[in-house]
Image (cartoon, rainbow, N blue to C red):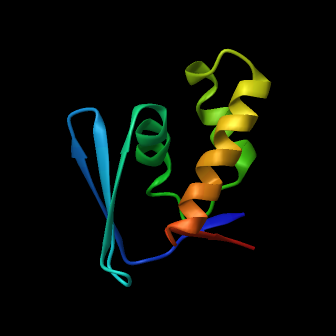
């Protein structure tokens, strides 16, 4: 399971999402598919990779593409200290 590191704030800006992580003071900009996924899961208290795949199948051509993209996104979110996994 993945969890957001709170407090975290999100602002929608046209087709982009700005995420502010209060503990670090960092702001991150996401766009495209990444932004859409973050918007759909920002209010979830916990989520799995499979949750993301299930909720966003329409954004990908196939399962392999979805798995690869979501793995990369989760890695970025962890590196930016926006989420952690258990």
Q: Image point 60% across, 34% down: which residue?
A: 55
- Marks counted in the figure total 0
Q: Is residue 58 above or below residue 2?
A: above
Residue drawn 74% across and 43% down?
A: 50
Above-or-below relation of 37 to 8: above
Position of 59 relative to 18 (above/below): above
**Side of 29 relative to 81 (left or right):** left
Q: Position of residue 81 (x, y in %)?
A: 52, 72
Please provide percent x and percent y for residue 33.
Answer: 48, 32
Please report the residue visible at 50 percent of the width from the left and 50 percent of the height from the top.
41
Q: Quadrant of the N terminus?
A: bottom right
Residue 3 appears in which quarter of the rendering? bottom right
Q: Residue 22, located in which quarter of the rendered image?
A: bottom left
Q: Is residue 76 or residue 86 the one in the foreground?
A: 76
**Percent from the top left, x then y, of residue 14?**
20, 34
> Can you give x and y, in whole percent of width and height, for residue 18 in the image?
29, 53
Left or right of 35 in this view: 74? right
- Report the quarter where the C terminus lies: bottom right
Q: Please, which residue is most extreme toward the left here?
A: 13
Tell whether 66 sits left or right of 80. Answer: right
């Amino acid at each position: 399971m993945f969890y957001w590191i709170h407090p975290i704030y999100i602002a929608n800006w046209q087709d982009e999402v700005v995420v502010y992580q209060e503990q670090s003071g960092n702001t991150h900009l996401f766009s495209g598919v990444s932004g859409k996924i973050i918007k759909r899961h920002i209010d979830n208290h916990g989520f799995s990779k499979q949750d993301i795949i299930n909720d966003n199948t329409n954004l990908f051509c196939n399962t392999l593409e979805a798995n690869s993209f979501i793995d990369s996104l989760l890695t970025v979110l962890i590196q930016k200290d926006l989420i952690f996994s258990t």
